[in-house]
């Protein structure tokens, strides 16, 4: 075992200072991903900064009608919270679609957002991987890539972002609140995860030492419905092949508002802006929903073994939007 230091932070400032002073240090949330990766030798932090006792474990109403979710709110608590279930059902459904009850009791909001890809080569230190060791290559392109990206990938990496929760947050226009050595800042969830480009080792735009303190949701649209749906190989305990989070508002048969995000297709939750453009103002029909999905998925560039994801994403989108439209 590689030796590592351990610090239990007493305040956000102490945690951030330690993060800045120890390059390569990692914040410890629930540990359900980080500790696994340490056991595999993928992560080898010199210092674990345990943020588990920081006062970031509350869900608070905002004056504007939005919701602030502390970075340490456990996944189970988030999914079960009445304001989340009532006003942002897609978020509750997405969290419940991930992992298992035991894991959700331990996993935190911040850790969920930052969990690493499940690409098998990334998790196997005997194999090359540009994300784990920049410049070593990407064996997934020629090897096992059935679960990996079909859109927005690069010659350097075809990994997918695994968090279901992040997909719902992208459709719901959530914002990530960060505290770092240079102060506080906010980043929209849609811009938080990166596409791989030629720097696949960087999953997100997080700067060294930055701590996620909260996720903020804007007020839910009163007349809109939201939903998350996930296609996977098993009914539970499996990551998404494709997932869809959608928000839809229909009045007199016409779509007033639409927000759509895909999971399992890309290196980040994929906000489907081209699909949204087709949807808004159009009649809420199966034909519109299919055209919207096609408008987005025309950018897909599947690899030899994951072309099935494109029609799967289309069918999932049409089904989810049809169900949401039927509720009006
Ligand atoms: C068997 C299994 C099945 C799973 N299935 C699914 C699934 O289907 N869908 C899904 O979405 N997830 C799934 N998960 C993943 C699970 O949701 C994550 O492991 C969990 O959400 C990570 O949360 P954590 O608090 O334990 O993070 P940790 O393991 O503590 O941390 C993860 C990363 O985030 C960093 N971090 C943690 N908190 C902060 C913070 N506040 N600020 C900055 N950095 C931070 C850590 O340094 C680390 O790099 C599964 C996990 C397992 C083990
Ligand atoms: S897809 Fe990305 S994570 Fe997987 S082997 Fe290639 S570089 Fe590594």
Image (tube, rainbow, N blue to C red):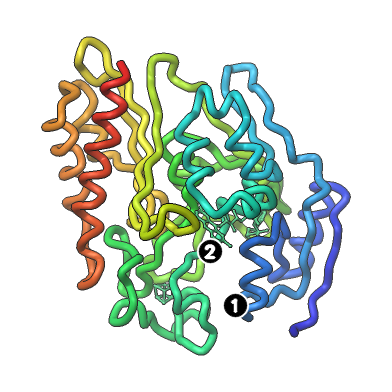
In the rendered structure, the answer to whether residue 25 lies left or right of residue 198 reads right
Tell me residue 189's x, y (percent).
Answer: 49, 43
Residue at 36% of width from left, 74% of height from top?
A: 156
The numbered mark, 2 or 1, whose residue comes first in the sequence reads 1
Residue at 44% of width from left, 71% of height from top?
A: 119
Q: Locate residue 34: give its quadrant.
A: bottom right
Q: Can the viewer see residue 270?
A: no
Q: Quadrant of the C terminus?
A: top left
Q: Residue furthest front?
A: 235
Instruction: Bin the neighbour count of mark 2 within 10 Å (Cα to Cα): few under 14, some 14-19, many 20 and up.
Output: some
Q: Mark 1 — residue?
A: 42
Name above or below for residue 151 compared with residue 158: above
Tell me residue 7's x, y (percent).
Answer: 85, 63
Q: Residue furthest right?
A: 10
Q: Locate residue 71: give its quadrant.
A: top right
Q: Can the viewer see residue 277?
A: yes
Name above or below for residue 30 compared with residue 287: below
Q: Quadrant of the N terminus?
A: bottom right
**Mark 2 residue's CB less than 8 Å from ligand 1:** yes
Residue at 26% of width from left, 40% of height from top?
A: 317
In the rendered structure, the answer to whether residue 284 lies left or right of residue 197 reads left
Residue 295 tag number: none
Residue 116 tag number: 2
Residue at 20% of width from left, 63% of height from top?
A: 307
Tell me residue 38's x, y (percent).
Answer: 66, 74
Residues tagged 2 and 1 counted as in contact (Cβ below 8 A): yes
């Amino acid at each position: 075992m590689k030796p590592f230091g351990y610090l239990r932070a007493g305040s956000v400032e102490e945690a951030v200072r330690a993060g800045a002073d120890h390059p390569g240090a990692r914040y410890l949330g629930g540990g359900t991903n980080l500790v696994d990766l340490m056991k595999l030798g993928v992560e080898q932090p010199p210092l674990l900064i345990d943020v588990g006792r920081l006062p970031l474990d509350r869900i608070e109403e905002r004056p504007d009608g939005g919701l602030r979710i502390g970075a340490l709110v456990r996944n189970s608590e988030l999914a079960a919270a009445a304001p989340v279930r009532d006003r942002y059902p897609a978020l509750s459904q997405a969290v419940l679609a991930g992992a298992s009850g035991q894991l959700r009791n331990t996993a935190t909001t911040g850790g969920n957002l930052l969990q690493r890809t499940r690409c098998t080569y990334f998790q196997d230190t005997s194999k090359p991987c540009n994300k784990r060791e920049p410049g070593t290559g990407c064996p997934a392109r020629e090897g096992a890539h059935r679960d990996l990206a079909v859109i927005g990938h690069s010659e350097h990496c075809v990994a997918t972002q695994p968090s279901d929760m992040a997909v719902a947050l992208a459709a719901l226009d959530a914002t990530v609140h960060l505290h770092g050595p240079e102060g506080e800042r906010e980043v929209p969830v849609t811009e938080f995860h990166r596409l791989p480009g030629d720097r696949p080792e960087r999953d997100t735009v997080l700067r060294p030492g930055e701590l996620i303190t909260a996720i903020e949701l804007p007020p839910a649209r009163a007349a809109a419905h939201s939903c998350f749906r996930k296609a996977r190989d098993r009914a539970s305990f499996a990551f998404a092949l494709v997932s869809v989070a959608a928000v839809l508002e229909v009045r007199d048969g016409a779509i007033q508002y639409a927000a759509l995000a895909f999971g399992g297709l890309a290196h980040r939750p994929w906000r489907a802006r081209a699909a949204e453009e087709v949807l808004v103002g159009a009649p809420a029909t199966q034909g519109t929903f299919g055209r919207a999905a096609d408008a987005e998925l025309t950018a897909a560039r599947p690899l030899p073994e994951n072309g099935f994801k494109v029609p799967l994403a289309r069918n999932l989108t049409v089904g989810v939007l049809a169900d949401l439209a039927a509720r009006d």
